[in-house]
Structure formats: C-alpha cells, structure tokens
Amino acid sequence: MDILISGASVAGPALALWLSRYGHDVTVVEKAPALRGGGYAVDFRGPVHLATLDRMGLRAALEAKATHMGDIAVVDGAGERLTALPSAIFSGDVEVLRGDLAEVLYAATRERVRYRFGDQITAVDQDETGVDVRFAGGTAERYDLLIGCDGVHSGVRRLVFGDDPETRKPLGVYGAIFTMPGTLGLHRSGIMYSEPGRSVTVSSPHGGNQIVSLSFYEPGLEYDYRDPDQQRRIIAARFADAGWRTPELLAAMEHADDFWFDSTTQIHLPRWSQGRVALLGDAGFAGGPGGNGTGLAIVGAHVLAGELDRARGDHRVAFARYEDLMRPYVATCQKQADAGPDFLVPLTWRKIAQRNRFFKMIRYMPIAPRLISRLASRTAAAFDLPTYELPALR
C-alpha cells in the first residue's frame, strides 16, 4: 500500500521502518525543516521494550549511544546532598537522547522511506478507497492509509478526529528543557533541586554541555505552544525567586537555541482510528512523564504494522486489532503517569521530604535491587508482545 505518516520524531520513523520492511510504499511528512537533534533523554525498560528493539535490529545502535547515566543527586538550597534518585528509576535499561534516537531511526529508514521535511498536512478527505491529503506546500496526494504520529498537538488528530478538549487531560505540570555549557562539573550524572510546586534538574549524559529541566505545577495555565518567547517569560516568572543555582540557569535559558516548553498532557480518545486514518504514539495516547511514552510508541508501531501484515492489508481488521491489543497497555502506563506530579514537583516541603526519605530508605533494604528494578519496569513489562511473521532485516 501507499501509506503517509505525519511526524518524524519517534513513532513515525519506527512505524515507517516496519511498514517499509513489509513491502509498503511509505512517505513521512514532517513540518520541521530537518531532523531535530539533541533534546531530553528517553528510555526503554523491561523485556517488552528490549524485545521490540531487538526485532527492529536497532538495540546495538542505541546501546552505542546510551547515556549510561549514574544516580541523580538531590540537593538543598546550599547544594548539600540529601539523597539520590537511582539511575534505574530515571534511565531504565537503555537511555539515549531523543535526538540520537531520531538519528538512529532515520538512518535505518532513509534508504527506503521518502522523507518530506518542511511541510505539513492542511486538509484530509477520505472515502472507501483512499485518503486525499493537501499539504501546506500547495500539493495534493492520494494515499491508501494515513497514520498520525505527530505528537500531543497532532494536526492529523485535529483534522480527522476533531478538537474536543475533553480528550485532553492536563496533569498540571509544565516544563522547559534546554542545553547550556557545563558549569556544574557533571559527567554522566545529574542534580535535582526542589521547592514546593517546582523542581530543577541538571544532567550531563555525555559530559561537556548540560541539559536543564525546569518543571512547575500550575493547573489551568493558558499559553501558546507555538510562542517560545512567551514560554521563556513564563519560566522566568515562575522561577524568579527560586534558590540554589537557578538564577544562572535562567540566564542561560535566554540564549539557548534548543529551548522547548510544553504541558504534561494525556490524550484519551474513544477510538484511535477513523476510516483509513489511525493515530499512533502521543498523537493518540500520550501518557505524560513516567508513562513510558517512547516505549509505547515503538511497541505500538510494531503492533500496528504487524496487524496490517497479518490482516493482509485490511485496515479495518488491523486497526481494530491494534487498538484491542494496545489499549490495556496504554491505560496501565497512563495510570502510572497520573502520579507524576507528586514525584516531579511535590507541592509542600513535607512531600518533598517524604520523597527524599523514600529514596534514601530503599537503598538500605535487603531487597533494594529487586525493588528498584520492579519500580522501574513494572508497567513497561505489562504487555504480552504478539509474535508476528517478521520480514528479514535489510
């Protein structure tokens, strides 16, 4: 089939990899002018994620780019160490920078997948036999299927499924991420500082530059997700009186060319497909922090492509089966992410102290290694990965 995928971050290229191996003609359209590098760290954890990477043939390439992060020290306003967050909790089994993951996926697909950068879908019209798509660049094409892999702010979801605010569940946490020159002497390690309702984390996965993350809790914040200047002002205002070394981080933010800001929002849709159009990854079921979003994207891509092959291209059967298989897994991961705000941005000094005591305590338990491993991967492993007829790697 001739299949169009919207979005070239993670879910889109992962799906393109499988579809192209199964013999489909695949185009990926991405509104950014080029592949996006850098960014925050993403991880894979547990046997389901790792088995999917093995089937994709990408595990070795990703392990070669792994951060191998150590524990994240938790400090007070004077910089004194209070406890540490185990690396397994944050980093899983294989952690890479999002940009490195995108590069590996692109390298594995660019020879047999058409990438259309600097363009986006503006209109979709489908019938029983195909999908007509109009692009911002002025052209129009017809495809057999359209798959939206274009994130929480999905244009495909808006055009085909509508823009019902009831399908979005904000978790109340907003965050910014950017890179700055290293000033804390970190190497494969990180530091977290928290005050009620806001947290600062600085990490340096590969040494040199450091990645800064600033998160705060404020339900109902109104902002324009396309206006980075407004977003910088929001962060500057919310952290203006924060302690530790926050002022120097805010100063560096003003000059960062990779600044990113967004809300932590879950997507809950009654259906993930309409006719010949389906959604994958954050576009269809964003989980939020701790919701295994990257793992869900690659597992979902494997399942969707596998079900299309098993159904011999009958999209109605394949889409229904994909949704039946993935929905319980997604629900489990989203439920875990509901507790994210209490972990990322505890709202009181007492809750901050409770979080810190928990991580200090588990290190001295006889079952500490098993407990930490279970906490890190229990939801990621809560899925029976189907067995598909896998095309040969090439």
Image: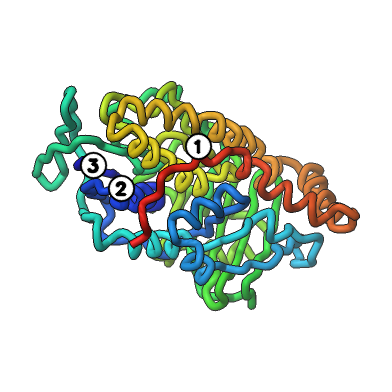
Secondary structure beneath label 2: loop
Q: Nearer the viewer, residue 241 or 5?
A: 5
**Position of the N terminus by quadrant:** top left
Which residue is at a point 9% across and 44% down the rendered structure image?
Answer: 138
Which residue is at a point 39% across and 41% down the rendered structure image?
Answer: 306
Q: Nearer the viewer, residue 300 or 350?
A: 300
Placement of 354 over or under 163, stated as above or below: below
Secondary structure beneath label 3: strand
Measuring from the top left, give residue 385's x and y in whole percent.
Answer: 53, 41
Measuring from the top left, give residue 173's x and y in whole percent.
Answer: 57, 41
- Residue 3's label in the rendered image is 3
Dot 1 corresponds to which residue? Answer: 265
Placement of 337 over or under 246, stated as above or below: above
Rendering colour mode: rainbow
Q: Nearer the observer, disc 3 or disc 2?
A: 2
Which residue is at a point 47% across and 27% down the rendered structure image?
Answer: 324
Q: Earlier in the sequence, mark 3 or mark 2?
A: 3
- Residue 22's label in the rendered image is 2
**Position of the C terminus by quadrant:** bottom left
Looking at the rendered structure, the kind of residue marked 3 is Ile
Placement of 137 over or under 287, stated as above or below: below
In the picture, measured across the screen, residue 324 lies left or right of residue 145, that is right
Q: Earlier in the sequence, mark 2 or mark 1?
A: 2
Classify mark 3: residues with Cα within 10 Å, few (<14), some (14-19) or many (20+): many
Q: Earlier in the sequence, mark 3 or mark 1?
A: 3
Looking at the rendered structure, the kind of residue marked 1 is Thr
The image quarter containing residue 329 is top right
Q: CA distance from mark 2 to mark 1?
A: 33 Å
Looking at the rendered structure, the kind of residue marked 2 is Tyr
Which residue is at a point 27% across and 24% down the rendered structure image?
Answer: 275
Q: Nearer the viewer, residue 41 or 197?
A: 41
